[in-house]
Each structure stands twice: as structure tokens, then as C-alpha cells.
Amino acid sequence: MAPQNRKRLNYGPAKYAAFHLLLCRWMRHYAQRGQFHYVTLGGTELRDIQSIHYVDDKCAAGIVSFESKKNEYELACGTRDRVHAIGLTVDVRHGDIFTFERIADGPHLFFIDLKGSCVLSDYHEKFADLMSANHIRAGDALLITSHLGARRGWVKLLNEYTDELDTLQVVGHEQRKLCFRRSHTSFTLFRALHRIRYQDAIELRCFGCIEYRDKSPMSIFGYTVAEGTTRFSNLVNEAPYFHVRRGLHTP
């Protein structure tokens, strides 16, 4: 058995079902013709990268995967070496995905696979920095996973986002919880736009929210980035929802 500090990152099937559904939705409806650059937190096994390679071994170029922990970076390097034998080239980097610096002009797909929640944090600042530096720009897309955050307490979570929920005219505790579950990453991204006053420069569109359960309740959100204006109510209300276990069921 491998020592604890050499533990691989293995996730359950629901996570990859959600990822593949949202990836398919993006490729079918929003991806531009030709290649895209892929930037990810691919984990120790680089499974998302292998999936994309299986779908089309020529669709992604300049694949970069970040790992912040040294032991996970070393395991990812081992996986990189193994997949290189089948013609899959990955640049595995030891560092923070939010330090990514763009060097190519083509469209980029970012898979920001967070281990925690995309709220009550400085993620709005990190996304704002990437956008203001033009590392995320029109023509790109984002896939973001986020823990639903209930372990922090619903009262604390909902109080933090009172302004957003009031703007959306969501009333009632249960309805506000439901809105938060389906929209909290959009709250963070809109705060990022507001921080750098980009609401009228970038149009963010959420093309899907898929809820699933791995070791805890999670969601994955998909966003397109275009020139234009982001209207907060549209960003939230026009996002289609799916649940891996319940399908299109609306509670």
C-alpha cells in the first residue's frame, strides 16, 4: 500500500459523468471549429485529459495541467510519462492554476476542478486577475467544480450572498438555498467582473450546472466568455440544470 503522502486522487463515477455531460454540451453547442488549448487541474491520473484525447486526439493543443502539492505533482508526472507513450503530450506544472499566463491566441478551455467551494474565499479576486491580465478572454470557456458548501452552515452562506439573492428576488429560505446550490459559482464570477468593472466588457453565459455526489455534494458549472455585457439575472436564470442521479427533475 502506498504511503499516505503518495495517495492518488481517485474520484467516483458521478464526477466524471457530470464532467463528460458538460464537456459534450460545450463541444456540441459552443466550441469553435479547430483546436482549443486546454488548461486544467487534471489530478494525479489526468483522466479529463485522457477523455478529451479519446473523443478527438487532435482537438486539444498546448495541454497544461497544474498540481499544487508536490507529491501529487510527482504522481501526475508519472501518469504524464505513461500517456506520452500513446501520443498524448501534457505539460504538468507544479503550481497554482491561477498563476497561468497565456502565450497563445487561440480559444482556451479551462477546467478548474476545485476541491472545496467557490464561495467565502478569494476566488473572485483570482478570476478577476486572470481576466484583467487577458489570460481569460473572449472565445474561452470555463468548467468549474465546487462543493455545495452546506457544511459551513446555510445561515452563514445565505447571509453572505444577501445582495445577490435580493437582486434576483428570491424569497423563502428553501428557495434561497436552491438558488445558491445552482448559482453560487456565478455569484463569484459576477463579483470578479464587478471588481475590475468588466460587466460591460465581457459577457459570461452559464451553459450548464450539473449536480452530483462524490464524497460530498458537488456541482460543475460551464461558462462561455464573449465580448459584450453580463447581466446578472441572465447569468443565473438562463443556466440549464441537470442532476446526475435525478436527471432533469426539478425539486
Image (spheres, rainbow, N blue to C red):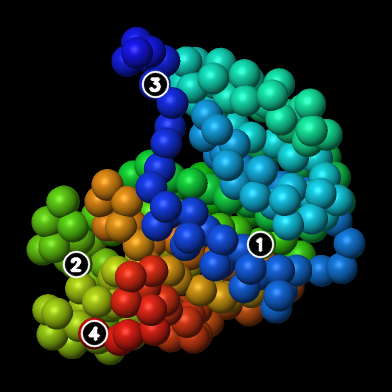
Tell me the residue that label 1 is attached to. Answer: 141
Q: Nearer the viewer, mark 3 or mark 2?
A: 3
Tell me the residue that label 4 is attached to. Answer: 251
The answer to whether residue 18 of the structure is visible from this angle is yes
Disc 1 and disc 3: Cα gap in Å? 31 Å
Tell me the residue that label 2 is attached to. Answer: 158
Q: Nearer the viewer, mark 1 or mark 3?
A: 3
Picture coordinates of residue 85, whole percent (x, y): 79, 26
Disc 3 and disc 4: Cα gap in Å? 37 Å
- Relative to 166, is 245 above or below? above
Picture coordinates of residue 150, whole percent (x, y): 18, 57
Q: Amino acid at mark 4?
A: Pro
Disc 1 and disc 4: Cα gap in Å? 29 Å
Checking the image for residue 185, the label placed there is none
Tell me the residue that label 3 is attached to. Answer: 7
209 with respect to 162 (left or right): right
The earlier-in-sequence mark between 1 and 3 is 3
- Relative to 127, is 240 above or below? below
Picture coordinates of residue 117, whole percent (x, y): 33, 50
Picture coordinates of residue 12, whole percent (x, y): 38, 47
Q: Nearer the viewer, mark 3 or mark 4?
A: 3
Disc 3 to disc 2: CB gap under 8 Å: no
